[in-house]
Amino acid sequence: MRKFIPLLFFLNFCLVSYNQVIVGTILDKNTKTPIDFANVYFNGTFIRTASDRNGNFRLDISKNPAMPVTVSAMGYYSITLTDFSAGDPILVYMIPKVYKLKEVVVNAKSLARKKKRYMVIFKNAFLGSTENAKNCSIANENDITFNYFSKKDTLKAFASKPILIDNRALGYKISFYLDKFEYNWRDDSFCFSGDIIFKEDSTLEESKKQVFREKRREAYFGSRMHFFRALWNNELEAEGFKITTLTGKKLYYKDLVFQKDSLKKFLKYPKKLCLHYLETDAVSYLYFNKKEVYFEKNGYFDPLAIEWVGPIIDQRIADSLPYEFGL
């Protein structure tokens, strides 16, 4: 059974209070020079801004006051900011991506065949293998490279530029900043991490929009976003979910969720859980990497806190929806 472990690189800034707008400056950690055209955004949404030539940025956070903010730039690892304040401007230091790879030119037939094979593996793991994945394409495959000459059991993929995805099934243009991709040849397991920005075509005809709306609804039901929204609203049963222990004991909202304030809820349980989606009889499993899992009303959750196993991980980038979906 495949395991999908979404790992993200987090850098937390301990600021003291929430505000409607955050401002800051983005710098290269090594050279301390400004980074222009860096994207500052809520991961998995449409909301974004960009830094200017001096590395300065300004982002309105009023619609997502408790959600982390991600900073991504070409050639750098993404950074996640939490706990924003109206105090002094934030200084964001970004770490350059350095890949220790042999210089290769993919032109020999043997190497071209190898890249083609690796790209198939990468796309199956990254985009997924659902019907929606079949209608996705990566516009800049040449910006993705692999550890071609490694003798280890792990295939790694690298991309210094954002991966540009055209999702013709759901009607989104996606930019994905890849921080890590690893595929294990021995057991067919994989993990990848990064951050995603959605863009929607506002020029589409109404008939086409309706097709996309239906496909998005299909992708939503039974997804991790659907589950966490149902959990937030204490509507698991009404939304077709059931949570049990591995021994079959049914659990309820009061057994799983505690709340610190109106914006923050946490999923907490000392043991592994079974997640049943009754519409399809699918059973997936939640393994906790942290004592508690922070989640929000829009379906956002801390991706570092859970390891998912089972059919729920069949939905990957090709079936991803922005957190604005349906709100």
Image (cartoon, grey):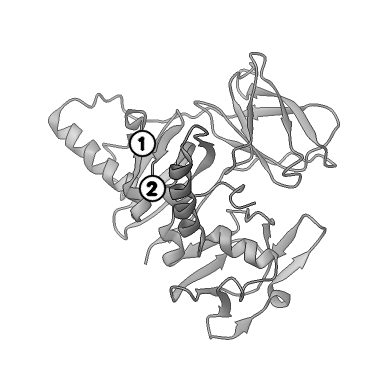
Q: Which mark is residue 183?
A: none
At label 1, which amino acid type do we have?
A: Ile
Looking at the picture, how far across and down is residue 217, in whole percent?
A: 50, 57
Residue placed under numbered mark 1 in the picture: 138
- Quick check: can you spot residue 35? yes
Residue at point 27% right, 36% down?
A: 148
Tally the marks.
2
Q: Are marks 1 and 2 in contact (CB under 8 Å)?
A: yes
Residue at point 50% right, 63% down?
A: 308
At label 2, which amino acid type do we have?
A: Leu
Residue placed under numbered mark 2 in the picture: 127
- Quick check: can you spot residue 317? no
What is the CA distance from the residue labelled 1 to the residue labelled 2?
A: 9 Å
Element assignment for label 2: loop
Q: What is the crowding at mark 2: few (fewer than 14 residues within 10 Å), some, or many (at least 20)?
A: many
Please indicate whether residue 143 sits to the left or right of residue 114 in the image: right
Looking at the picture, how far across and down is residue 13, in whole percent?
A: 74, 38
- Residue 56 occupies which quadrant of the picture? top right
Residue at point 62% right, 56% down?
A: 299
Q: Is 46 or 145 nearer to us in this picture?
A: 46
- Residue 4 occupies which quadrant of the picture? bottom left
Above-or-below relation of 246 to 311: below
Mark found first going from the N terminus, 1 or 2: 2
